[in-house]
Image (tube, rainbow, N blue to C red):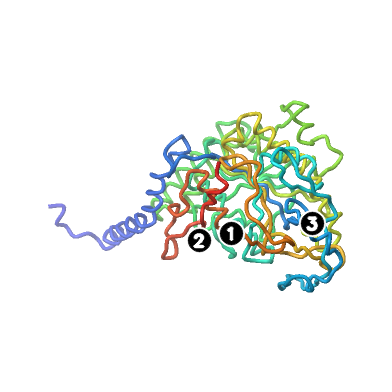
């Protein structure tokens, strides 16, 4: 009988390889299959771990580290002791550049704003008008006083290079509600964070979930316009590529590089129509252009206003996670080691009106309730000067804020000491921030795991507590 005939050596090898490939593919795929079963249907309205309060995230990344004592954390004691040696009034920790100047009062006046009475400096006249939407966390801490490691921690949950970004984790877990666009999109205003594109990488997750970086130009992504003169030629090429990739995948055990390439081809094909329509803000009314500051004489305001408006359009189209980076305003981001007044004023001018417009516009369209907006830098700054008129990095206590998406508006959470230097109440680590963002999206951060390197990996590593005190 045929089954008793000996197989030739090459056939036996092929069968053995097939068995090994099946086992290898099963081992790699079981975790992903379980996660897919658990979460992926949510892209079309399926089940998450619990009822979500938010469905999408806009991350307003404030590159360089805004000063908490000049923005949202009012400390009148600094004015009283302005010009004193800080070591005579409190313990000074080692700083990044070890250039310790005098206690420095904020150059800007603080006032209680809105019905909530939250304190905010004059740096943000527009944002102050919507402050009742904000949940200001004044007790953030970081593990690192240096930009690159602090950025990796903020973006990926670890200070090391190569881990999946927060946006990659979220788009991996939830997918995108719009199959014509990636789930994780970065709008590049001109400044890529220290640490580079690894802040938006997929790490050990499938490559399809890395951030897609859009430029604010007529050609936001390379090769957007097809070279073929008609759609049929392009479709035939794509069909051929798909067949070739399928053959390679079957032979090699469906490696991630090929699987992700196939997905990218398909998404890129659909993006040829979706992205130009997305980026065409000429269809927006003149009133919207004015609201976002697109007609501003300040190039930074117009640039960031365009980002914020496109972010709103992305949210309308179902993108899951949208990150905005700072525009280049000529003062090295928010990283003012000198000339604090000039640098912080330039950066605040760029983002103040557009962010207030974004919050107003989302609320008017009924989108703020299900969109979580996060404003954060990688750390804060010292309450004493670096040199004469700058501030050094400070990881011991700083401020961020959240709005919409299931958080309480018009509240302050946590507290720094009377100098705005170190957190003394309701300490919030980056892991806690990540756990809370996932919770608001309907994901238990302890259950969103991937087996890699011999253990179950997650965005929050072995840390993280949901900030129940800020939940609406």
Asked if the residue at tag 3 contacts the one at tag 2, i.e. Cβ–Cβ closer than 8 Å, the answer is no
Among numbered discs 3 and 1, the one appearing first in the sequence: 3
Mark 3 falls on what kind of element? Answer: loop
The x, y position of residue 154, in whole percent, is 61, 57
In the rendering, which numbered label is found on residue 360?
Answer: none
Report the residue marked by disc 2: 463
Mark 2 falls on what kind of element? Answer: loop
Up the image or down, 267 lies above or below 412; here it is above
Among numbered discs 1 and 2, the one appearing first in the sequence: 1
Asked if the residue at tag 2 contacts the one at tag 1, i.e. Cβ–Cβ closer than 8 Å, the answer is yes
Q: Nearer the viewer, residue 52 or 229?
A: 52
**Relative to residue 20, is residue 447 drawn left or right?**
right
The x, y position of residue 265, in whole percent, is 54, 43
Mark 1 falls on what kind of element? Answer: loop
Q: Residue at x 51, y 57 (%)?
A: 464
Report the residue marked by disc 3: 76
Residue 104, quarter of the rendered image: bottom right
Up the image or down, 204 lies above or below 351; here it is below
The x, y position of residue 391, in whole percent, is 79, 63
Report the residue marked by disc 1: 429
Q: Comparing marks 3 and 1, which lies closer to the viewer?
A: 3
Residue 143 showing in the rendered view: yes
Quarter of the picture holding the C terminus: top right
Among numbered discs 2 and 3, the one appearing first in the sequence: 3
Asked if the residue at tag 1 contacts the one at tag 3, i.e. Cβ–Cβ closer than 8 Å, the answer is no
Q: Residue at x 43, y 46 (%)?
A: 246
């Amino acid at each position: 009988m045929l089954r008793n005939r000996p197989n030739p050596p090459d056939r036996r090898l092929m069968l053995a390889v097939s068995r090994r490939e099946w086992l290898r593919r099963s081992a790699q795929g079981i975790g992903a299959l379980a996660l897919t079963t658990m979460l992926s249907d949510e892209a079309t309205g399926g089940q998450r771990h619990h009822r979500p309060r938010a469905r999408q995230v806009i991350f307003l990344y404030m590159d360089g580290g805004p000063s908490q004592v000049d923005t949202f954390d009012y400390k009148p004691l600094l004015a009283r002791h302005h010009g004193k040696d800080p070591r005579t009034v409190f313990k000074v920790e080692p700083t990044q550049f070890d250039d310790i100047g005098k206690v420095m009062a904020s150059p800007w006046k603080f006032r209680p704003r809105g019905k909530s009475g939250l304190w905010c400096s004059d740096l943000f006249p527009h944002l102050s008008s919507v402050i009742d939407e904000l949940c200001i966390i004044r007790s953030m801490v970081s593990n690192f006083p240096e930009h690159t490691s602090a950025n990796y921690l903020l973006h990926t949950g670890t200070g090391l290079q190569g881990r999946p970004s927060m946006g990659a984790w979220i788009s991996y877990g939830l997918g995108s509600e719009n199959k014509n666009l990636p789930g994780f999109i970065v709008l590049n205003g001109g400044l890529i964070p220290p640490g580079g594109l690894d802040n938006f990488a997929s790490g050990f997750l499938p490559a399809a979930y890395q951030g897609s970086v859009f430029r604010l130009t007529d050609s936001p992504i390379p090769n957007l316009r097809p070279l073929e003169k008609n759609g049929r030629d392009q479709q035939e090429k794509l069909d051929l590529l798909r067949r070739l990739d399928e053959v390679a995948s079957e032979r090699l055990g469906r490696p991630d590089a090929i699987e992700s390439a196939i997905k990218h081809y398909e998404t890129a094909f659909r993006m040829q129509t979706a992205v130009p329509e997305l980026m065409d803000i000429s269809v927006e009314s003149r009133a919207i252009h004015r609201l976002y500051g697109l007609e501003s004489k300040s190039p930074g305001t117009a640039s960031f206003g365009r980002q914020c408006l496109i972010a709103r359009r992305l949210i309308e189209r179902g993108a899951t996670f949208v990150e905005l980076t700072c525009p280049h305003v000529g003062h090295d981001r928010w990283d003012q080691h000198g000339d604090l007044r000039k640098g912080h004023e330039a950066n605040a001018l760029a983002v103040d009106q557009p962010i207030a417009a974004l919050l107003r516009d989302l609320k008017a369209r009924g989108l703020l309730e299900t969109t979580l907006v996060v404003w954060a830098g990688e750390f804060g700054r010292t309450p004493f000067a670096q040199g004469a008129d700058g501030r050094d990095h400070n990881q011991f206590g700083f401020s961020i804020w959240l709005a919409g998406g299931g958080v309480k508006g018009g509240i302050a959470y946590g507290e720094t000491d009377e100098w705005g230097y170190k957190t003394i109440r309701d300490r919030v680590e980056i892991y806690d921030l990540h756990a809370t963002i996932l919770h608001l999206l309907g994901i238990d951060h302890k259950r969103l795991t991937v087996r890699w390197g011999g253990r179950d990996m997650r965005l929050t590593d072995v840390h993280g507590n949901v900030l129940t005190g800020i939940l609406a």
